[in-house]
Amino acid sequence: MGLRDRLKDRGETSGPSGHKAGSEQRYKMRERIISIGDDYWIENEAGERAFFIDGKALRVRETLNIKDAQGNDLYKIREKMLRVRDTMDIEDAEGRTAASIKKALITPLRDRFKVEVANGPEMDVQGNIMRHEYNIEAGGGKVAEVSKKWFRVRDTYGVEISPGQNAALILAITVALDQMAHD
């Protein structure tokens, strides 16, 4: 029995982050803020701090840790070195690979990436990564949409995550894509 089922049984409509069960979740991200040593918060649509990005300084390769609001490690993003095409791995808190992101070799009209999820369907990322206007899809359905259209603030974009998705993993994928696009 999942959280949504427990909430339904109790007659509640919102989950732990205050979102209605079965509704999209939106998060606010800042543009080009990721670099070695950078730390920042990802906020939910209510402006509450939801996830913390900890940019580890003084490493041979780039490493970013994603933590929940209480400071618990959720995911670690690592750049793979010496690859033919850009690749980043996302590890879970136990150090197991949760997802690998690979840039498509030929991208004539727009950016394309493949995300291989360890315990889930493969995801396709298509759109303009540099301008933060793209979709993440799996099995023909939208998993998340990344766009600037929800915010008027400069250097800010939003991530809208479909119901039933792992928000922390989708945000880790978004951070990794931002890192890959702006290197």
Image: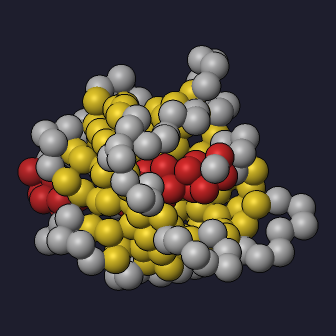
Furthest residue toward top: 153
Residue at (36, 23) in percent of width and height = 47
Residue at (38, 82) in percent of width and height = 118
Q: Quadrant of residue 119?
A: bottom left
Q: Nearer the viewer, residue 31 or 54?
A: 54
- From the top left corner, tell me how far across and down residue 69 is, in percent: 20, 38
Which quarter of the figure is the N terminus placed in? Answer: bottom left
Q: Is residue 47 above or below residue 64?
A: above
Q: How many marks?
A: 0
Q: Is residue 23 above or below residue 46?
A: below
Q: Quadrant of residue 156?
A: top right
In the rendered structure, the answer to whether residue 86 lies left or right of residue 104 reads: left
- From the top left corner, tell me how far across and down residue 181 is, in percent: 66, 52
Q: Nearer the viewer, residue 117 or 137?
A: 117
> Is residue 145 in sight in this rendering?
no
> Is residue 126 in sight in this rendering?
yes
Furthest residue toward right: 108
Residue at (22, 45) in percent of width and height = 68
- From the top left corner, tell me how far across and down residue 173 is, in percent: 48, 59
In the rendered structure, the answer to whether residue 20 lies left or right of residue 12 reads: right
- Colouring style: secondary structure
Q: Nearer the viewer, residue 159 or 114?
A: 114
- From the top left corner, tell me how far across and down residue 77 is, in percent: 39, 60
Q: Quadrant of residue 40?
A: top left
Q: Nearer the viewer, residue 165 or 102?
A: 102
Residue at (18, 71) in percent of width and height = 94
